[in-house]
Every structure is written in structure tokens, then in C-alpha cells.
């Protein structure tokens, strides 16, 4: 009778072969039920513990069937578990079922320090007593179970998505990793569909690159450019020597100018001279003048296609006082060229004659003044100096026209005409007493000019700490003015006489220092030259040209 009852009980007590049984002492129930069990169930593993054994059956039979039927038994080792004789019986049974540990029926976990029985100590134990390595070793335990216990079929879950998620968890996908993958997939969809923020937009698009080009000039009929440090030797034959031209038509490309072998070659240095500035007379734009660092002035009578010597450099410009700025005045029939040295001095050039300007009664401009900018406006020349004022030169007479409170502080880096009828000018000045040193201001330097505006304009149109490499000003109908400036760090800003109206995306290749040039194309598009220069070296860099137009979104990052 007893034997028959026992057999009936054994038939009623059955546990899932793909489940895992956790054996623990009552002192460890919180950890086993609240931490270990949820981690296993989150991976899709069915868990059997003392909390869900079959009711109405003897404890011994329940534990025997749980150990025998399930795929794994996790033993949570602690002093209380080792001292319990029932647990010793469970360990003996597990070792009897898998004596060589081939099936890995027993997975011991050391939760609290205790003396481990020798029959268990021979197995690899996940030691969770080291708090620093607790998380990694617990994750290893979960993987030990996942490797042996298959995931239940999809119909065992509330929906198929839950089954997919459990599969992903088995493969190491956490919530953070899953979110990262989902975000990445969403980004790919947005990029492929060109949905915000990945839609085409107004960006800088690279058009061409020419070695060394750093100086850009728009004659109104042609774009011409010159290189700085154009090579380590003097090339011969029909090759590129650092001067180039490009017609203004949209499909045109940059072409090397024809330059005689010795025109730009400095034999004493064994290299080509720099092209430091380019200019032309507004009434005869096809005649282009290129100012060099050591050789003087070259001239092109065909808009920059070919060059010849116009005037050799004055010997007083030799050494460290290289010329830096060029302005073309006079008349189209009798042009007058103005040249300023990098460190000091201003010269008027008529043909082969170089005449130093200043230092006399008619022109009290200091003979050693460092000139930072030149501007021809009709029959007058404006010369901005370094902390020695702004000077108006008409014929042989020179007059200082800036305000007394700014003349000793300001350096005039850029000058441009804003209104010929009102003698209104736009200037980039460096104020040595201001934190934001560089400022764009409106100047009305002559008597009765701009009667509604003080000197200078009371509010700067722009101010920053970065030097401006290029300033472009275009008078508009009805007296309006549009200005654009580019600084050494590749930032481009535009505005009117009321202030900034637009900030263009930054040219990222100019994070250190760039030589910049600006020009308008006939269709009104902005054309930009950027040539990175961190140091003055002979190493040739790429002068790259950009237009601002509609293009791929990533061109905002790398045009």
C-alpha cells in the first residue's frame, strides 16, 4: 500500500526538463528570489525553487524530482547551506547523477564565505563574495545557465516580440545596446530618406583645389589668384608657377597662367617668390597687377592669362620689409600703384619709379609707419596704419582723418567702400584696449560725410577675437550695403549696416589658421578660397575653392 502510494506520488511530481532548480538556505531567500531568479527569468529561463515546488508532496520527493528532472541545479553556498543535512543529501544526489561533471548538473555559487565541502570544491565555483567582481561573475553564472537551457518556443510568451527580445538578451543585448542599435537603424532610415535633420541644405561645396593659392581677386571679368610659397625650386618650361586664372562662367575651371621662367624666381633663394596681393583698375579690369614678395610687380594685359614684369622691386623693400598690400589708382591710361611694406613704409609706383610717401611737410604720414590696409576710392587713397591713424592721400597731400580717441588704439586691418556718394567706408579695426579686439565699423572720415553717423559708427557691426582675412562689400540699390567677412578660423559672416544678418557654416579645415579670399560670382553666389596656414613655411598646401549652395547635409561637417 505504501509502495503504491509512493509510485503514484512520483508520477504526479514532474518538473520541466528545460528549467533550472535553485537550492538555497532560508537565510539567502531574499537574494535568490529577488535578484538571481529575476535575472534568469529575464533571459527566458524557467526557474524552480522551494517557493514553487508541488504542494502536498514530501519535501524529499519534491527535491529529488526537481534535481533529477531539471537541466541545472544552482547551489547557493553559505555557512547555513553547508550545515544543513538536507543540502548535503542534494549535493550527493547531484554528484551521483553526474559524477564526472560532464553534464554540468551542479553549478555552485559562493554567496557568503564558508568552508566548501570537498565534493563540491573540485568544481569551478562562481565566487560572488568579491564586491568588485560581483556583477561580472553573476553575469557569467547567467551565461552558464543560458548555454544549457534552450529558450521556450514563441507560443510560450505573450507575443512574438517578447520572444525576440529574450533571444536578443541571450546574445548579450542589453537595454542600452538595444536602444543604441535602434537609434542607429533609425538614423540610417532618416539618412536614406533624407528626412530632417539629414535633408539637403545650404552648405559649402568644394569645387576645385590648386596648390598654394592663397590670394584671390575678382576683376569683374575674371577671377585671378596667386600662391604663397609656391615651391622649393624654380621650375622651367610651361608649368604652374603660383599664378592662375578662372573665367567667371559657371562651368569654368582654374588654369595656370603663363609666366616667364625668371619672372618669379629668386635665384639667391633657389625658390619662387610669394604672390602677396593682386589688384586691377576698376575702369580697365583686364589689366591685372600681381605684387610679389621680392621681385616687384608683374602685370597681365589679358586678365591673368599671362604675365610679364611691370616694375622691379625697389631695393629699399629688400630684407624683412617685404611688400604686403597693393592698390591701383590714377586713371586707366596712367595708373598709379600704391605698395605698402609688411613692417613699414608706403610707396607710390609710376612705371619703374618707386617713390616713398610721407615724412615731409606736404605729407606728414610718418615715414616708418606700418601700413595695414590700402583702399583707392576715386582719386583718393585711404591708408590704415598700425596705431598711427587713418590717412587720406590726394596727390602729394596727406591728411590724418580718424578720430583722436581711436587713432592711437586702432590698427586698420581691412578697408572697403560702402557708399561713394557719401564717402562712407567699412573697416575692420583691431582695438588693443578691447577684449573683443577685432571690430567691423562704419567710418565717415571726411567733413560733411555721413552726417547722420558719428565717427565711428556707435555700434560695431561685428566683433570677435579672430583676425579677418578677407572683407567683401557690395553696395545694393537704394543705398543698401551687404558685407561679408571671413576670419582665420574659417568663420564666414554677412550683414548690412545694421549688423549681422547671417552666419555661414564654418570651414572645418581652418580650425588652426587659413588664408581666406572672397568673391562674388555673376549669379550672386559667394565664392571662397581657403588655404590652411599654421606656420610660414615653404611647404605647399592646397588652396581649395568653395561655393555656398544646396548640397548633402554632411557637408556642414566636412565640405
Image: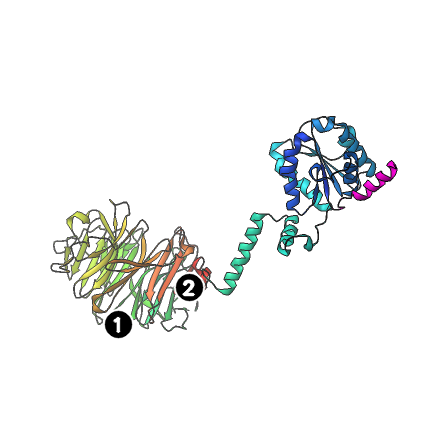
Give the residue drawn at x 35%, y 72%.
248
Is residue 2 highlighted in magenta? Answer: yes
Residue 504: x and y in percent read 36, 59
Q: Nearer the viewer, residue 495 or 293?
A: 495
Left or right, 505 with respect to 37, comes to left
Q: Quadrant of residue 496?
A: bottom left
Residue 319: x and y in percent read 31, 51
Task: Report the residue marked by disc 1.
Answer: 284
532 is higher (above) or lower (below) than 140: below
- Discs 1/2, front: 2
Dots 1 and 2: beta carbons under 8 Å?
A: no
Give the residue drawn at x 16%, y 63%.
422
Marker disc for residue 533: none
Q: Which residues are magenta?
A: 1-18
Q: Tell me if residue 83 can be seen.
A: yes
Instruction: State the predominant SS element of the stretch in magenta.
Output: helix
Left or right, 295 with respect to 147, comes to left
Left or right, 94 with respect to 173, comes to right
Circle 1 sits in a helix, a strand or a loop, which is it? strand
114 is higher (above) or lower (below) than 181: above
Task: Report the residue marked by disc 2.
Answer: 201
- In primary-sequence order, the first of circles 1 and 2 is 2
State the CA–CA distance, disc 1 to disc 2.
38 Å
Q: Quadrant of residue 327?
A: bottom left
Amino acid at each position: 500500500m505504501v509502495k503504491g502510494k509512493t509510485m503514484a506520488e512520483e508520477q504526479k511530481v514532474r518538473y520541466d526538463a528545460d528549467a533550472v532548480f535553485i537550492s538555497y538556505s532560508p537565510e539567502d531567500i531574499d537574494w535568490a528570489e529577488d535578484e538571481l531568479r529575476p535575472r534568469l527569468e529575464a533571459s527566458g529561463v524557467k526557474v524552480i525553487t522551494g517557493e514553487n515546488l508541488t504542494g502536498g508532496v514530501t519535501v524529499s520527493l519534491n527535491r529529488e524530482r526537481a534535481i533529477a528532472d531539471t537541466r541545472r541545479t544552482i547551489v547557493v553556498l553559505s555557512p547555513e547551506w553547508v550545515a544543513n543535512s538536507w543540502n548535503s543529501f542534494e549535493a550527493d544526489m547531484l554528484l551521483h547523477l553526474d559524477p564526472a561533471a560532464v553534464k554540468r548538473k551542479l553549478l555552485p555559487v559562493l554567496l557568503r564565505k564558508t568552508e566548501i565541502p570537498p565534493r563540491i570544491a573540485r568544481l569551478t565555483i562562481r565566487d560572488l563574495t568579491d564586491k568588485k567582481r560581483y556583477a561580472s561573475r553573476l553575469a557569467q553564472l547567467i551565461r552558464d545557465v543560458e548555454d544549457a537551457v534552450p529558450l521556450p518556443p514563441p507560443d510560450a510568451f505573450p507575443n512574438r516580440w517578447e520572444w525576440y527580445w529574450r533571444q536578443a538578451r541571450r546574445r548579450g543585448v542589453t537595454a542600452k545596446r538595444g536602444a543604441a542599435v535602434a537609434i542607429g537603424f533609425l538614423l540610417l532610415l532618416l539618412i536614406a530618406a533624407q528626412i530632417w535633420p539629414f535633408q539637403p541644405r545650404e552648405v559649402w561645396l568644394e569645387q576645385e583645389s590648386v596648390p598654394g593659392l592663397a590670394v584671390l581677386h575678382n576683376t569683374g571679368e575674371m577671377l585671378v589668384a596667386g600662391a604663397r610659397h609656391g615651391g622649393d625650386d624654380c621650375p622651367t618650361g610651361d608649368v604652374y608657377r603660383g599664378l592662375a586664372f578662372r573665367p567667371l562662367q559657371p562651368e569654368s575651371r582654374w588654369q595656370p597662367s603663363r609666366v616667364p621662367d625668371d619672372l618669379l624666381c629668386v635665384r639667391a633663394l633657389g625658390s619662387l617668390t610669394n604672390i602677396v596681393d593682386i589688384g586691377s583698375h576698376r575702369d580697365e579690369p583686364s589689366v591685372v597687377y600681381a605684387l610679389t614678395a621680392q621681385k616687384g610687380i608683374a602685370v597681365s594685359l589679358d586678365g591673368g592669362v599671362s604675365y610679364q614684369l611691370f616694375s622691379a622691386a625697389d631695393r629699399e623693400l629688400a630684407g624683412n620689409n617685404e611688400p604686403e598690400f597693393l592698390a591701383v589708382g590714377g586713371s586707366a591710361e596712367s595708373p598709379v600703384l600704391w605698395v605698402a611694406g609688411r613692417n613699414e613704409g608706403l610707396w607710390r609706383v609710376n612705371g619703374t619709379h618707386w617713390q616713398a610717401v610721407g615724412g615731409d611737410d606736404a605729407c606728414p604720414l610718418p615715414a616708418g609707419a606700418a601700413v595695414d590696409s590700402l583702399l583707392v576710392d576715386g582719386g583718393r587713397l585711404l591708408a590704415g596704419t598700425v596705431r598711427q591713424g587713418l590717412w587720406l592721400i590726394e596727390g602729394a597731400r596727406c591728411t590724418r582723418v580718424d578720430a583722436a580717441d581711436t587713432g592711437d588704439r586702432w590698427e586698420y586691418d581691412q578697408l572697403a567702400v560702402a557708399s561713394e556718394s557719401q564717402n562712407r567706408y567699412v573697416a575692420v579695426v583691431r582695438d588693443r584696449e578691447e577684449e573683443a579686439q577685432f571690430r567691423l565699423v562704419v567710418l565717415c572720415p571726411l567733413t560733411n560725410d555721413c552726417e547722420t553717423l558719428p565717427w565711428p559708427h556707435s555700434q560695431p557691426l561685428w566683433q570677435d577675437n579672430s583676425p579677418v582675412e578677407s572683407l567683401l562689400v557690395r553696395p545694393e540699390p537704394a543705398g543698401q550695403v551687404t558685407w561679408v567677412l571671413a576670419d582665420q578660423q574659417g568663420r564666414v559672416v554677412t550683414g548690412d549696416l545694421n549688423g549681422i544678418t547671417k552666419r555661414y557654416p564654418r570651414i572645418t579645415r581652418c580650425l588652426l589658421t587659413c588664408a581666406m579670399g572672397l568673391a562674388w560670382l555673376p549669379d550672386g553666389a559667394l565664392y571662397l578660397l581657403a588655404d590652411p596656414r599654421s606656420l610660414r613655411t615653404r611647404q605647399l598646401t592646397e588652396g581649395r575653392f568653395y561655393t555656398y549652395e544646396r548640397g548633402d547635409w554632411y557637408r556642414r561637417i566636412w565640405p
